[in-house]
Amino acid sequence: MNAQPRGTTAHRAIPHRAGARLRGTPKAQPRRALRLVAPVANRARRTPFVVVLLTLIGLGLIGLILISTAMQAQTFQLARLSSQARDLQTTQESLQRDVSELKSPRTLGPKALWYGMVPSQTPVYLRLSDGQVIGSPKPAEARTNLEQVIR
């Protein structure tokens, strides 16, 4: 180590080749022999980076495969559920058609007779706004006015 105090800089003269030639005193410097040097361990520094990079690429590819597989499974499930929804829609329309057919007067008349109901010859109406009964109710007689309902 240098014995110079810190913060001071010592300037020393650096001999220059041109200066030696100009002065006329050639200084012979010993030539160093060239020798082979072991290669720098660049490979060792690159190896962890390459391993991390290949690991990330591998994990990315595995993730893409898993996502693709999941999306295909969801596509098949979507197709199955769409088919089921179409079948349920058809069933609902069929049931609605059956209910509206069963609610029609053409179907209700014979069913009412089958249950023992007798059609009235004087209908009575109820006004919902004020609850007033319009008409005079009279009890129906058994086995009367059957031809009108059956037709």
Image: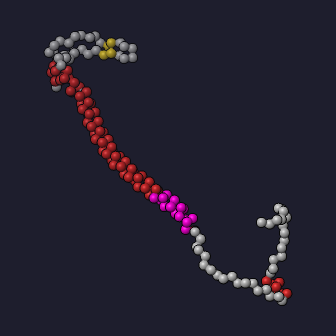
Q: How is the image coloured?
A: secondary structure
Residue for point 26% across, 30% down = 99
- From this view, report whether residue 34 is shown above or below residue 10: below
Residue 33: tell me if it is visible.
yes
Q: List x then y, in percent, for residue 100.
A: 26, 30
Q: List x then y, in percent, for residue 108.
A: 22, 24
The prevailing secondary structure element of the residues shown in magenta is helix
Q: Look at the image and give the residue range highlighted in magenta.
A: 43-58
Residue 148: tell me if it is visible.
no
Corner quadrant of residue 126: top left
Q: Which quarter shows the C terminus? A: top left
Q: Is residue 46 magenta?
A: yes
Q: List x then y, in percent, for residue 26.
A: 80, 88
* Front residue of 127 and 96: 96
Q: List x then y, in percent, for residue 111.
A: 19, 23
Q: Is residue 123 magenta?
A: no
